[in-house]
């Protein structure tokens, strides 16, 4: 057991306790996770993921091995497989088995031989070094207790020339809109989560975790510290979310 502490929403918890509590959150909401994303964002999360896909641009005519982390329900992976060529293969990795079960059920037999699902921790990937052409993580990095460890692992498993892409909530940068966004986040989203999933507390944590996530500049510095180069970030929808990019050179 470690004495190190981190944040779980606005609470301070032991580092080893955070992962257990995050697991409980996603175990609770797995079945209706994507439905809640649609309701909370008025469908915008699909637009943001389409921008992520456009940024990635999986190739049509050559082998492309991709790792999607914290992507258990499969929505990002399916977009990549549909956009890429027949030699595109995606490994979906998630620490939560319930989320992966949702993804497996949704995939069915559509992508036979082109997708696999791995239950593992982003901080300790059970994957060989220099294996993947690209790595994505959408709305997952803020739930990782040791973000720096996850970023180092991302760098390790990417091939030289490989790209890291992270889609994550960010900082609203429009006056007045930031206050409206806060009011909506703290007053509406937990109630909505309670009605749809029966678990308001999990959505209260998810809202709080957004506010505790590093600023775009601070997170970019963490990506560089992990070894990535040509690090950039692109705000979307007035800064509600951002796409962070880095290359293994």
Image (spheres, grey):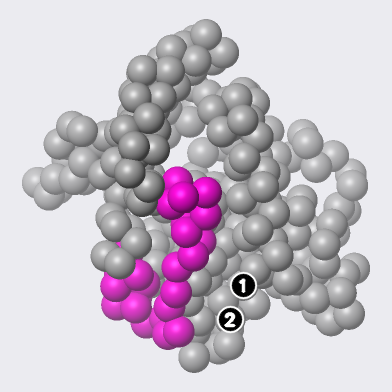
Residue matched to label 1: 134
Provide the secondary structure element on which disc 2 rests: strand
Residue drawn at the location 49% of the way across and 84% of the way down: 248
Q: Position of residue 234 (x, y in %)?
A: 49, 65
Locate residue 249 relative to residue 114 in the image: left or right: left
Q: Does the magenta stretch include residue 238?
A: yes
Q: Residues within 10 Å of mark 1 (few under 14, many from 20)?
A: many
Q: How far apart are marks 1 and 2 (CA)?
A: 5 Å
The stretch in magenta equals 219-243
Q: Quadrant of residue 200?
A: top left
Say if residue 230 shows up in the picture. yes
Instruction: State whether residue 129 appears in this view.
Output: no
Q: Say left or right for 78 vs 154.
A: right
Numbered mark located on residue 246 in the image? none
Q: Quickly name the residue at label 2.
A: 162
Badge 1 marks a residue whose secondary structure is strand
The image quarter containing residue 155 is bottom left
Residue 236 position, x and y percent, is 52, 54
């Amino acid at each position: 057991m470690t004495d190190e502490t981190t944040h779980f929403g606005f609470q301070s918890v032991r580092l080893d306790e955070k992962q257990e509590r995050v697991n409980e959150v996603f175990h609770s909401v797995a079945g209706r996770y994507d439905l809640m994303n649609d309701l909370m964002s008025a469908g915008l999360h699909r637009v943001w993921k389409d921008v992520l896909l456009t940024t990635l641009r999986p190739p049509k005519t050559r082998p492309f091995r991709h790792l999607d982390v914290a992507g258990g329900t499969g929505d990002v992976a399916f977009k990549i497989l549909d956009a890429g060529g027949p030699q595109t293969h995606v490994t979906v990795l998630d620490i939560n088995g319930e989320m992966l079960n949702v993804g497996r059920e949704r995939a069915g037999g559509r992508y036979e031989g082109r997708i696999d699902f791995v239950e593992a921790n982003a901080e300790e990937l059970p994957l060989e070094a220099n294996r993947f052409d690209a790595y994505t993580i959408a709305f997952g990095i803020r739930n990782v207790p040791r973000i720096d460890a996850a970023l180092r692992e991302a760098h390790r498993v990417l091939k030289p020339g490989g790209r890291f892409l992270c889609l994550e909530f960010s900082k609203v940068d429009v006056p007045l809109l930031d206050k409206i966004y806060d009011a909506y986040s703290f007053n509406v989203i937990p109630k909505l989560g309670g009605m749809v999933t029966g678990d308001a507390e999990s959505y209260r944590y998810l809202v709080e975790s957004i506010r505790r996530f590093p600023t775009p500049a601070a997170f970019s510095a963490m990506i560089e510290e992990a070894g990535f180069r040509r690090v950039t970030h692109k705000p979307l929808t007035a800064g509600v979310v951002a796409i962070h990019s880095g290359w293994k050179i």
